[in-house]
Image (cartoon, grey):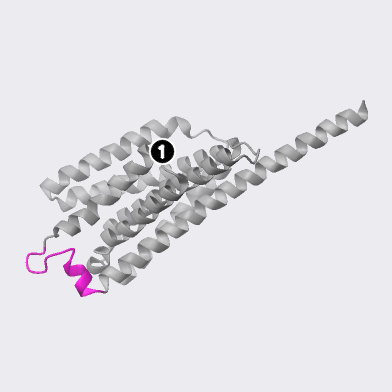
Amino acid sequence: MDNKNNYEWAQESVFVQQEKTVAKKFFANVFLWMFVALSLSTAAALFISSSEAALSQLINFETGQRTVLGYIAMFAPIGLVLLMGAGFSRLSYGALIGVFVLFSVLLGVSLSFILLIYTAGSIATAFGAAAAIFGIMAFLGYTTDVDLTKFGPILMVGVAGLFIASLVNLLIGSSTFSYIMSFFGVAIFTALTAYDVQKLKQIGEGLEADGSEIVAADAKKLAIMGALSLYLDFINIFLFLLRIFGGRK
């Protein structure tokens, strides 16, 4: 009887250890893809901002207005995010990677304008502050025992409100309104970071460690979508901080 209990205990221990390994591997892949996205966006932004020929394709220097390509670069990332979300089950792993990489590059192209508007020092400061806030909230989201899922709907409403308010401000053009929105933006995406990390932790723990090709493929695709969520949280924190504290050239 003791041998049977010991055998069952050993089996359970191996399964639990296997499950933890899968969860850690999943989490590592999430942050790896997030790093890839940040690297691609940074490289694209630096390249565009340092090339007058490339910039001339995105903005008309005489009028100061965006060109057709400039508007495509501005709004295409939104469409690609929607494509990844809606087509998750239909897109293959390779196709999802391709869309994710394209999104990262185009967002970097769109963000290249901030390198022309803000000083290098203020960009570096905002980036460092965003990294610190993101790191702290990611740690809290991973380690806290408080269930953050109940805050999900509230945060989603906040994101939707920010998006609508931004569209309205495009018509109004109020710098004061934009400044006030930035504080709400930092607060909402700071909270979203903890929420998303906890959600990803739960996804990682819930993955079946049976080694099947279907589960492995799903885990890889979920890692990309998780990286997308955290990447958007970080970028939005950075951009809102830059609006608040950034020094213009």
Give the percent coordinates (x, y) of residue 177: 19, 47
Residue 98 visible in the displayed image? yes
Q: Residues within 10 Å of mark 1 (few under 14, many from 20)?
A: few
Give the percent coordinates (x, y) of residue 163: 25, 42
Give the percent coordinates (x, y) of residue 107: 31, 56
User: Magenta residues?
Assistant: 51-64
Residue at (42%, 48%) from the top-left corner?
A: 96
Examine the rendered structure and indicate whether residue 98 appears above or below residue 18: below
Q: Residue furthest left?
A: 63
Residue at (24%, 74%) from the top-left corner?
A: 51
Give the percent coordinates (x, y) of residue 140: 53, 45
Which amino acid, mark 1? Answer: Arg
According to the image, label 1 marks what residue?
90
Residue at (15%, 48%) from the top-left corner?
A: 170
Q: Tell me, yes or no, whether the highlighted magenta stretch contains residue 116.
A: no
Residue 126 visible in the displayed image? no
Where is the C terminus found, in terms of image quarters?
Answer: bottom left
Residue toward you, 90 or 228: 90
